Image: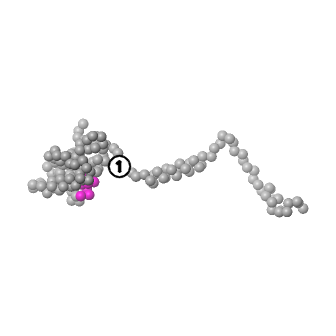
Amino acid sequence: MSDNPNPIDEGEDDFALPRKKREDDEMDITPMIDITFLLLIFFIVCSTMDPTKIGTIPEADNGLAISAKNSAVIFINPGGGDEVILSRMDGTNFSTDEDLQATEIIEYITEELERSLGVSKQYVMLFGDANIEVGKVTRVQKIIGDAFEDVDATYVAVKEQ
């Protein structure tokens, strides 16, 4: 018999597979790929896609002919930096404070829709400059859409260059 008191240990040497030696220039990139996919999934899940924060209004080639007489009109002009100046049809400006501005926009459109003088005003028209960011126009459209469910459509007009 053998000197080993445990006969199971003797058989292990017979079944051991030889280990393949790795070459020095070979590298396992599986963990790096795993981490890359985990980071990708993390950023996709945690990011918010807000198209109102980027972009500019595209140039319009053609569109519908909407009369300003049948619409409540708001002008959106560039101000200093990223700011815009909103003004009424008569040329008076809305407030620069966003909360007060939203209230003024609602009041102005309400007055315009009620003061139609026989002409049915069911549209809101936003005249914008080509250099205005989409987010600024979308903010005004959201204010109008939230406040007026009976307005058929909001039209955006872009000044020609």
Which of 71/83 is in front? 83
Residue 28: where, in percent of width, then height? 62, 46
Residue 152: where, in percent of width, then height? 21, 56
Which of 39/69 is in front? 39
Identified by mark 1, the residue type is Pro
- Residue at 44 percent across and 53 percent down: it is 46
Q: Within the magenta stretch, is there residue 123? A: no
Residue 82 lies in quadrant: top left
Q: Main secondary structure of the magenta part?
A: helix
Q: Is residue 67 left or right of residue 58?
A: left
Where is mark 1, residue-wise? Answer: 51
Residue 11 lies in quadrant: bottom right
Query: What colour-coding does the image apply?
Result: one colour
- Residue at 65 percent across and 42 percent down: it is 26
Q: Please state the extent of the stretch shown in magenta in the rendering.
A: 140-147
Q: Is residue 42 left or right of residue 2?
A: left
Quadrant housing the C terminus = top left
- Residue at 34 percent across and 47 percent down: it is 53
Q: Is residue 42 left or right of residue 12?
A: left
Which of 88/26 is in front? 88
Mark 1: secondary structure:
helix
Residue 9: where, in percent of width, then height? 80, 60
Q: Residues within 10 Å of mark 1 (few under 14, many from 20)?
A: few
Q: Is residue 142 visible?
A: yes
- Residue at 28 percent across and 44 percent down: it is 83
Quadrant housing the N terminus = bottom right
Q: Is residue 65 visible?
A: no
